[in-house]
Amino acid sequence: MVSDKSHGPARPTLAIDVGGGTQDILLWQPDTPIENCVKLVLPSQTVVVANRIRRCTSQSVPIFLTGNLMGGGACVGALQQHLQAGHPVYAEVGAALTIYDNLDRVRALGVTLVEEPPPDVHPVIMGDVDHAALAEALAPFEVELPDSYAVAVQDHGFSPHGSNRLFRFQQWRDFLDRGGRLDQLWYEEPPDYLTRMQAVKRDLPGALVMDTGAAAILGALCDPTAADKTQEGLVVLNLGNQHAVASLVLDSKIVGIYEHHTGCLTVAKLHDHLVRFRQGTLSDREVFDDQGHGCVTLPEVKDMSAFPTVVVTGPQRHLAKSLGYYFAVPYGDMMLSGCFGLIRAATGAI
């Protein structure tokens, strides 16, 4: 997660934080108070595509997947239901990689890979960002989209023959090994193995891209109470609809990362994991065996007293409601935490 970006003059930027349930959108204008900027919380494209596939299933219509690699989740679940109902699915290779990195697994599922759509199929356009739909939706309000973009997606990385959970968490390990600096959490040019980010770059050339977990960390630190705690060290916890990411932040560095699936967590488990995470005693293996991604802390993580504050953001933050943690409200809007992180990365202006 590296950038050599040097911020130039701030310019209007469209920030899109793509989650498993929602896509959170901020059209940031440098000459407008951030509270007055255009903001949207919409269903994420995986949810939108899933609904389109289900409509075809109910009408017994064969489908053709075209477009770009995107996040799976809801759309892959709907696709499997379509196949189980006995309806054909055809796909271009680029779109099919949404399902699995291994195309043999895609074929084994029952998907037919083609270069051109067969007759009498319904096209389903894949992709994490629908720029045309956003432009059309905002046009009646005399809002034009800028040509500067910052987009966050959760990218497991290309791992056709191994665990994508292990592969993804290795990226966090590599980031910590490089120093864990907060200003190294984004990409202007992502590596080839981050195929979902590469897909976003194909749809939106010139976009700055970053991981959703990284965007949430930067965004939560836009909350003044959170920012004031960085010198003593704090935990930033993003409870997303699908993934929970916690980071140990000390000064301008991250010294520990924990990632799990939100659906696997109870209040008691979350509290126990975060206590031991702060102590540096929660093992990577325990989290992975519990169907999470992993846990890693640097040697300087000694005991819980070093990270006394836990700052929470994310749409599933209610999971931590009874734990006495601080709920971040950057610029008064928790749902836009990731967007604020994206704007901070892209412009350095907030």
Image: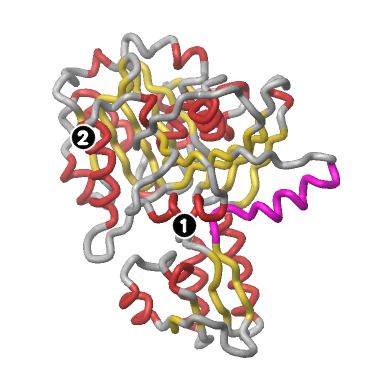
The scheme the figure's colours follow is secondary structure
Q: Is residue 132 left or right of residue 302?
A: right
Residue at x-position 78% and y-position 45%: 138
Give me the residue at 45% from left, 14% from top. Answer: 227
> Residue 35 location, x and y as percent?
69, 23
Judged left or right of residue 335, residue 249 is left
Mark 2 and mark 1 in contact (Cβ < 8 Å)? no
Q: Which quadrant would the N terminus be assigned to in this image?
A: top left
Whether the magenta-drawn stretch holds residue 279 is answered as no
- Looking at the rendered structure, which numbered label has been put on residue 296? 2
The main secondary structure of the magenta stretch is helix
Q: In this view of the protein, which residue sits in the foreground, 237 or 215?
A: 215
* Residue span colored magenta: 127-141
Q: Which residue is mark 1?
A: 71
Q: Residue furthest bottom?
A: 119
Q: Secondary structure at mark 1?
A: loop
Which residue is at a point 44% across and 84% down the rendered structure image?
Answer: 112
> Where in the figure is residue 106, as x and y percent of width and height?
37, 76
Residue 208, which numbered label?
none
Q: Is residue 167 above or below residue 277?
A: below
